[in-house]
Image: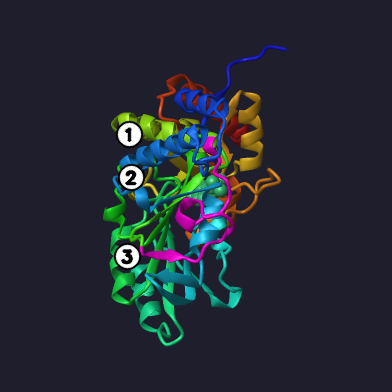
């Protein structure tokens, strides 16, 4: 059997661990100490955590004191989606959660809100939240029951489409609501400033930027406004999140943040390779001619993450394509995969009004920050074989 180099084009699922993250994790793993202890080892662990917090704060251009480390974005989502908030010394009630239809599953579940207090908000054909509809919904919100909360992502994991978060925040704040933003996919891919988003709470994940899996963060725009803690115990993370900190994972996350801060300009340019791949996918269909459809690119023409392309060619099933690509050493994703690894219908594409055939054929390519031109070439060659088979 001939083994060929693999090309990993699935960064939105999880990015490979950066060398700098691995090194700082090993260093932290080799150290002893609980960050809450007052002795030398404890202070050393605390220093490691605070260094990582400062690195993350610098990448998102915000105050380190407003960052809470968690075990990942899913925990962060369950933390911030809370009907009970604290504002200064007071309790604040949030009576209803409004969620964009294209949100990630960890948001769509609604966190700590009862199902009857959750409403899904429609998006347009590009996956952009319908702001006029949001305005109407908030006008009809019963403020006597409590405040509204809206959860919208910065960028979609399947299509890369970027939401007009600032505009959405203005509408929500006009109605005395709170905005939670899932910024998981935006980190390290766009120039992100917390202040600019206008969000009240934001969630992040380390493994999408080349940090380790199992660590993430919450950012509170205003430290005096916070959700009631999800995990209670010791007073870690300024009493926001109990439990001994995962020092090594946090160190790895911090190192990845530092790397991205120095490489962001280069990362953003990855859209040039993505656009060229999309052009060539179209050329492949055109050259094969009438026997095969032209690709549909979801969210094309919108503001999108530069590394992401989600497309479908009628007649090509994503499950078949993914397997053929995998055999050729190329890892991509379908529009959406469930935890069992099976391809299932994408709720994102469904919300965008995609047809059944488009949903069954959706393939997601998510490039890394290093321009893998060879990976792109091999992907396109393998894709040509797949569509030629369909056309035959
Ligand atoms: N939000 C988005 C947009 C994601 O893509 C993901 C990961 O797939 C998550 C949240 C969940 O992150 P984590 O794996 O850290 O729980």
Label 1 to label 3, Cα distance in Å?
26 Å
Tell me whether circle 1 and circle 3 mark residues in contact (CB < 8 Å): no
Q: Which label number is shown at residue 169?
A: 3
**Image position of 174 with respect to 261: above or below:** below
Give the position of the N terminus as an image quadrant: top right
Image quarter hosting the C terminus:
top right
Relative vertical location of residue 104 with respect to residue 189 in this rendering, above or below = below
Q: Residue 60 carries which label?
A: 2
Is residue 17 within the magenta segment? Answer: no
Q: Distance between the residues labelled 2 and 3?
A: 18 Å
- Secondary structure under the numbered disc 3 in the rendered image: helix
Q: Is the magenta stretch mostly helix, strand or loop?
A: loop
- Total marks shown come to 3
Which secondary structure, mark 2? loop
State which tag comes first along the sequence, 2 or 3.
2
Mark 3 nearby-residue class (10 Å; few <14, some 14–19, many ≥20): many
From the top left corner, tell me how far across and down residue 254 is, in percent: 43, 35
Say if residue 4 shows up in the picture: yes
> Which residue is under mark 1?
261
Crowd band around label 2 with a 10 angstrom C-alpha radius: few (<14), some (14–19), many (20+): some
User: Residue 229: x percent and y percent?
Assistant: 52, 62
Residue 203, position in %: x, y? 45, 52
- Residue located 39% across and 36% down the image: 51
């Amino acid at each position: 059997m001939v083994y060929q180099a693999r090309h990993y084009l699935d960064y939105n699922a999880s990015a490979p661990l950066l060398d700098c993250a691995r090194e700082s994790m090993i260093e932290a793993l080799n150290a002893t100490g609980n960050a809450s202890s007052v002795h030398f080892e404890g202070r050393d662990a605390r220093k490691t955590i605070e260094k990582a917090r400062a690195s993350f704060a610098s990448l998102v251009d915000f105050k380190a004191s407003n960052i809470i480390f968690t075990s990942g974005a899913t925990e962060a989502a369950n933390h911030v989606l809370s009907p009970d908030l604290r504002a200064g010394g007071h309790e604040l009630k949030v009576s209803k959660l409004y969620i964009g239809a294209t949100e990630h599953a960890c948001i769509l579940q609604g966190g700590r809100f009862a199902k009857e207090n959750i409403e899904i908000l429609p998006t347009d054909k590009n996956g952009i939240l319908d702001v006029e509809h949001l305005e109407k919904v908030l006008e009809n919100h019963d403020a006597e029951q409590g405040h509204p909360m809206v959860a919208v992502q910065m960028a979609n994991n399947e299509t890369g489409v970027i939401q007009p978060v600032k505009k959405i925040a203005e509408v929500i704040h006009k109605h005395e609501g709170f905005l939670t933003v899932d910024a998981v996919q935006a980190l390290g891919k766009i120039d992100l400033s917390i202040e600019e988003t206008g969000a009240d709470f934001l969630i992040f994940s380390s493994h999408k930027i080349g940090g380790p899996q199992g660590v993430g963060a919450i950012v509170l725009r205003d430290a005096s406004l916070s959700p009631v803690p999800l995990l209670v115990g010791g007073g870690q993370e300024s009493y926001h999140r109990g439990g001994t900190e995962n020092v090594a994972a946090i160190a790895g996350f911090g190192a990845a943040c530092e790397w991205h801060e120095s490489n962001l300009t280069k990362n953003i340019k990855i859209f040039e390779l993505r656009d060229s791949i999309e052009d060539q996918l179209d050329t492949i269909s055109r050259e094969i001619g009438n026997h095969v459809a032209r690709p549909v690119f979801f969210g094309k023409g919108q503001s999108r993450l530069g590394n992401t392309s989600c497309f479908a060619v009628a007649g090509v099933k994503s499950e078949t394509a993914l397997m053929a690509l995998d055999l050729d050493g190329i890892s991509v994703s379908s529009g959406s995969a469930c935890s069992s690894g099976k391809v299932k219908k994408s709720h994102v594409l469904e919300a965008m009004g995609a047809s059944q055939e488009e949903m069954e054929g959706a393939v997601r390519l998510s490039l890394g920050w290093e321009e893998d031109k060879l990976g792109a070439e091999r992907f396109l060659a393998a894709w040509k074989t797949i569509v030629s088979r369909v056309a035959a």
